[in-house]
Image (cartoon, rainbow, N blue to C red):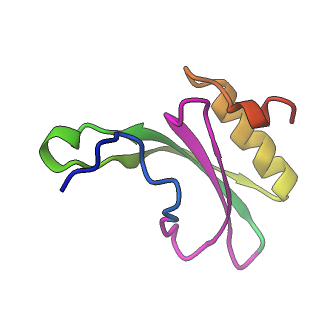
Amino acid sequence: MKKNTRTPDTGVHERYNGHSWIEVLYSREKLHRAVITRDQSDVYRVYNERRDDSDWEAWGTVLWAPMDKSLADTLDRARKIAREYLVATADGVAAEEDAS
């Protein structure tokens, strides 16, 4: 049975090449997100993704489509990269991130 929503499940943490999931930042309307991970060498990666609901009518699914990926040497730098990506999207950074 299809859920009556096109919003992706924000509680699901996908796997990113075995890296540890650190945090995720969303745009205002949750159309975009930036996932921050860390590998065993303490290198941070920021995965920029957009919401894709193109299969909604056929399958009732919403997924995150990859856009690009960045590397950072610190968590603070990774957060800055994530915010820069979200600010540049059509729906901007989420309100709780505006002050950061």
**In the depicted view, which residue is nearer to us: 40 or 26?**
26
Residue 57, how many percent across, how many down?
A: 16, 39
Residue 31, how many percent across, how many down?
A: 49, 34
Q: What stretch of residues is rendered in magenta?
A: 14-41
Residue 98, how many percent across, how many down?
A: 80, 29
Locate the C terminus and report the quarter of the image it occupies.
top right
Q: Is residue 79 left or right of residue 56?
A: right
Magenta span contains residue 31: yes
**In the depicted view, which residue is nearer to us: 22 or 58?**
58
**In the depicted view, which residue is nearer to us: 77 or 8?**
8
Magenta span contains residue 21: yes
Q: Residue at x 42, y 48 (%)?
A: 8
Q: Is residue 89 left or right of residue 99?
A: left
Locate the N terminus and report the quarter of the image it occupies.
bottom left
Q: Please, which residue is most extreme toward the left here?
A: 58
Q: Is residue 28 above or below residue 6?
A: above
Q: Residue at x 74, y 66 (%)?
A: 43
Q: Residue at x 68, y 33 (%)?
A: 94
Numbered disc total = 0
Q: Is residue 13 above or below residue 93?
A: below
Q: Is residue 9 left or right of residue 3?
A: right
Q: Residue at x 40, y 45 (%)?
A: 65
**In the depicted view, which residue is nearer to us: 49 or 7?**
7
